[in-house]
Image (tube, rainbow, N blue to C red):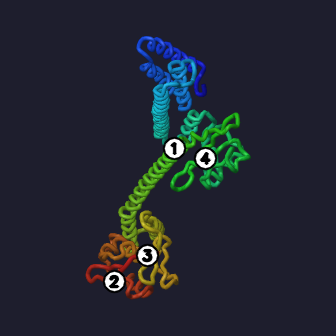
């Protein structure tokens, strides 16, 4: 009987024989009416143990057996009594319906077990991937688990524009990588048993994400047969989705760690620059002011004072240039009307033409540009540009502002009477 092993066929025949023997004994004592129910157990057994068609054949066989042994004329397939015809017909219908219901339940149970097994496989696979922290570890776990699940060789390839092997095997040939590269670029499977795969024994499937293919998974069997049967493709797609999620998670975590490092580094640089601007530069200005006083007072070695003053001025210039770097700000020029102030390159243009400024003029303008829209007091500008020793020398600041207005326009720097100066607007190119 199709769908049954020899042992199962013998068991069903034994059930038929037992039902017939008991039926003959019962018919002799109580008549043939209850005998028909004895042939339902073999039908149920066939439905549970086999598929739909063996169960239907068993139902037909049970009907014929009852007709042969228990309807007049006995030991033939003829039916003389209309009542017996109705009984045989009902037995056949009950057998067919029962076998259909039982096999349907059996198929649903098998389908539920299949889905439960597949879900358990996907969940276990996802748990293994969660333990991985980088792309290489994810590729190794994915290759090992998929090789176990599908009982084939598995490799993972990534990289654009040149594909490279991440995990799974020792090496791939140039032909293998040549087939894998278009899969990474287009996100379309290729390889053996798929279009475009005559050069390789591998079958490559893309690991897709929203931004495109993150990697390509290669599968191959030593006997050359397809590595994944048609009914296993849906499971493979689900597992590839898990790999894609793991790779995206790893890349986002890596980007987050890099951003954290950059933020910490920029904060440290900003702190260092702030310390230089607020602590070192004023002291250098104080040293320069002290040297000038010594030069005016006389009595000291003029050559030594001149040398020290020159080195202090040079060091002050270096510190000023270094302190003016602000990594947190944009490197685009600051626009005030037709004037462009490039703090990063230390250049100023008016109507597109470069304008030459003295170091002090540029320092005043740069301080105003960094705080465009805000009023900077006279003391603040004098301390920032000339140093703490010159906070009361407002005439220095007025001369510098007057020169800036002549070179760049009278409306460039706005005066706040008895307070300070400000630039009217700030924008970036």
Q: Circle 2: is it few (<14), some (14-19), or many (20+) Cα within 10 Å?
A: some
Residue 228 spot, x, y in % from top left: 61, 39
Identify the secondary structure beneath mark 3.
strand
Residue displayed at 43% across by 58% down: 266
Which residue was labeled with disc 4? 205
- Measure the C-alpha gap from mark 4 to mark 3: 51 Å
Q: Nearer the viewer, mark 4 or mark 3?
A: 4
Q: What residue is pinned by disc 2?
A: 414
Label placed on residue 41: none
Total marks in image: 4
Res. 27 image quadrant: top left
Q: Nearer the viewer, mark 3 or mark 1?
A: 1
Q: Nearer the viewer, residue 361 or 286?
A: 361
Q: Residue at 56% of width from left, 38% of height from top?
A: 140
Q: Are marks 2 and 3 in contact (CB under 8 Å)?
A: no
Q: Is residue 79 left or right of residue 410?
A: right
Q: CA distance from mark 2 to mark 3?
A: 16 Å
Name the residue tied to disc 3. Answer: 334
- Would you place residue 58 above or below residue 129 in this image? above
**Is the residue 300 above or below the residue 1 in the image?**
below
């Amino acid at each position: 009987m199709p769908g049954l092993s020899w042992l199962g066929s013998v068991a069903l025949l034994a059930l038929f024989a037992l039902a017939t023997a008991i039926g003959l004994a019962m018919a002799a004592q109580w008549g043939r009416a209850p005998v028909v129910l004895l042939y339902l157990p073999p039908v149920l057994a066939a439905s549970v143990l086999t598929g739909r068609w063996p169960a239907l054949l068993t139902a037909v066989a049970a009907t014929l057996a009852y007709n042969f042994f228990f309807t007049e004329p006995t030991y033939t397939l003829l039916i003389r009594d209309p009542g017996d015809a109705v009984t045989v017909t009902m037995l056949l219908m009950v057998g067919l319906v029962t076998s259909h219901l039982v096999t349907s339940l059996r198929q649903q149970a098998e389908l539920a077990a299949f889905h439960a097994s597949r879900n358990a496989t996907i969940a276990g696979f996802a748990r293994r991937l969660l333990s991985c922290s980088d792309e290489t570890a994810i590729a190794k776990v994915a290759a090992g688990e998929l090789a176990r699940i599908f009982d084939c060789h598995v490799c993972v390839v990534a990289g654009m524009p040149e594909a490279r092997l991440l995990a799974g095997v020792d090496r791939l040939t140039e032909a293998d990588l040549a087939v894998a590269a278009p899969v990474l670029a287009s996100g379309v499977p290729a390889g053996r048993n798929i279009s475009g795969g005559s050069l390789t024994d591998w079958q490559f499937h893309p690991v897709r994400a929203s931004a495109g293919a993150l990697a390509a998974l290669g599968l191959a069997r030593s006997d050359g047969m397809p590595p994944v049967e048609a009914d296993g493709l849906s499971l493979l797609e689900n597992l590839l989705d898990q790999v894609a999620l793991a790779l995206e998670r790893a890349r986002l975590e890596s980007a987050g760690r890099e951003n954290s490092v950059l933020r910490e580094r920029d904060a440290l640089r900003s702190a260092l620059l702030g310390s230089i601007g607020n602590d070192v530069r004023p002291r250098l200005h104080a040293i320069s002011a002290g040297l000038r006083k010594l030069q005016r007072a006389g009595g000291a070695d003029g050559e030594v004072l001149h040398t020290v003053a020159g080195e202090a001025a040079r060091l002050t210039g270096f510190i000023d240039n270094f302190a003016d770097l602000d990594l947190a700000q944009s490197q685009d020029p600051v626009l005030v009307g037709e004037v462009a102030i490039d703090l990063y390159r230390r250049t100023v243009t008016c109507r597109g033409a470069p304008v030459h400024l003295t170091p002090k003029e540029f320092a005043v303008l740069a301080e105003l540009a960094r705080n465009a829209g805000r009023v900077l007091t006279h003391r603040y500008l004098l301390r920032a540009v000339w140093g703490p020793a010159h906070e009361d020398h407002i005439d220095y600041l007025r001369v510098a502002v007057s020169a800036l207005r002549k070179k760049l326009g009278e409306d460039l720097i706005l005066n706040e009477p008895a307070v300070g100066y400000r630039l009217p607007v700030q924008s970036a190119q």
